[in-house]
Image: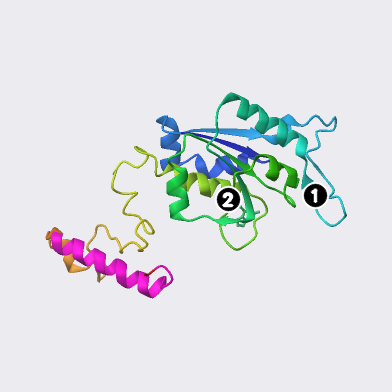
């Protein structure tokens, strides 16, 4: 898979993705993540990439020209399955969305910043608009990192234990059961006996019941 990320602040997106499982997936060649600085594409002689909104009002709007040139160049080089724009008014990211996007070959993620992008870019190019929740961030960069993380960890080979991604919270609309590791007794706080029993059928049953109980209690909206 190839992910092209278009942003005025590449460092913000790169930071969270340059560690752990996602970094390893990049190093193994499972995914290619290409960062593009929109400022490199402006034809403005002062390197400007934004301007005041027509009609007035506070804040700046990202200009159409550099984004148009960058997306047009990328589209001339390969076909994209989706061109995503990160925005608080998009569809809220969830696990089924991440699952679907993880099956794609090439995607673009365009990060909004300031007041957003000139709306004509959305009309011309954007095929999907994604928000990561009902709160406002300074820009779409952290959202792009979240979306990318949720996709890349699902790619075959990204997580060493193949079954691990499928048993995540949300994959079956159930939260994960509690987990423990050594020591089994820490200052008198003990791990549930069943996990030390060696009886794997009982352990499976216990974990499943814990998932159901925790989902009912913590996320009744997920429980159907
Ligand atoms: Cl995608 N962008 C911004 N700026 N804020 C957000 C968001 C995106 N998702 C939730 N809040």
Residue 206 percent across, percent down from the top left: 21, 67
User: Element under label 2?
Assistant: helix
- Residue 185 seen from this side: no
Residue behind label 2 places its C-beta within 8 angstroms of ligand 1: yes
In the picture provided, is 215 more to the left or to the right than 142? left
Q: Earlier in the sequence, mark 2 or mark 1?
A: 1
Q: Residues within 10 Å of mark 1 (few under 14, many from 20)?
A: some
Residue 136 percent across, percent down from the top left: 65, 60
Residue 98 percent across, percent down from the top left: 46, 49
Range of the magenta residues?
A: 201-222
- Res. 161 image quadrant: top left
Which residue is under mark 1? 60
* Residue 114 is a magenta residue: no
Which residue is under mark 2? 143
User: Element under label 1?
Assistant: loop
Give the camera-side residue of 67 and 159: 67
């Amino acid at each position: 898979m190839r992910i092209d990320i278009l942003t005025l602040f590449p460092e913000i997106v790169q930071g969270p993705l340059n560690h752990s499982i996602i970094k390893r997936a990049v190093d193994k060649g499972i995914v290619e993540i290409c960062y593009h600085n929109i400022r490199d594409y402006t034809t403005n002689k002062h390197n400007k990439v934004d301007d005041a909104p027509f009609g007035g009002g506070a804040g700046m709007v990202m200009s159409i020209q550099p984004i148009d040139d960058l997306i047009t160049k990328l589209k001339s080089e390969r076909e994209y399955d989706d061109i995503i724009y990160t925005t608080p008014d998009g569809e809220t990211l969830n696990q089924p969305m991440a699952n679907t996007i993880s099956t794609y070959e090439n995607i673009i993620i365009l990060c909004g910043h300031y007041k957003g992008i000139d709306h004509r870019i959305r009309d011309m190019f954007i095929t999907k608009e994604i928000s990561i929740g009902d709160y406002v961030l300074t820009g779409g960069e952290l959202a792009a990192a979240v979306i990318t993380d949720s996709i890349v960890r699902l790619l075959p080979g990204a997580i060493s234990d193949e079954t691990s991604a499928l048993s995540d919270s949300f994959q079956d609309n159930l939260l994960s059961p509690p987990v423990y590791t050594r020591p089994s007794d820490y200052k008198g706080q003990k791990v549930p006996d069943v996990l030390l029993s060696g009886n794997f059928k009982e352990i499976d049953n216990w974990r499943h019941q814990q998932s159901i109980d925790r989902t009912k209690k913590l996320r009744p909206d997920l429980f159907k």
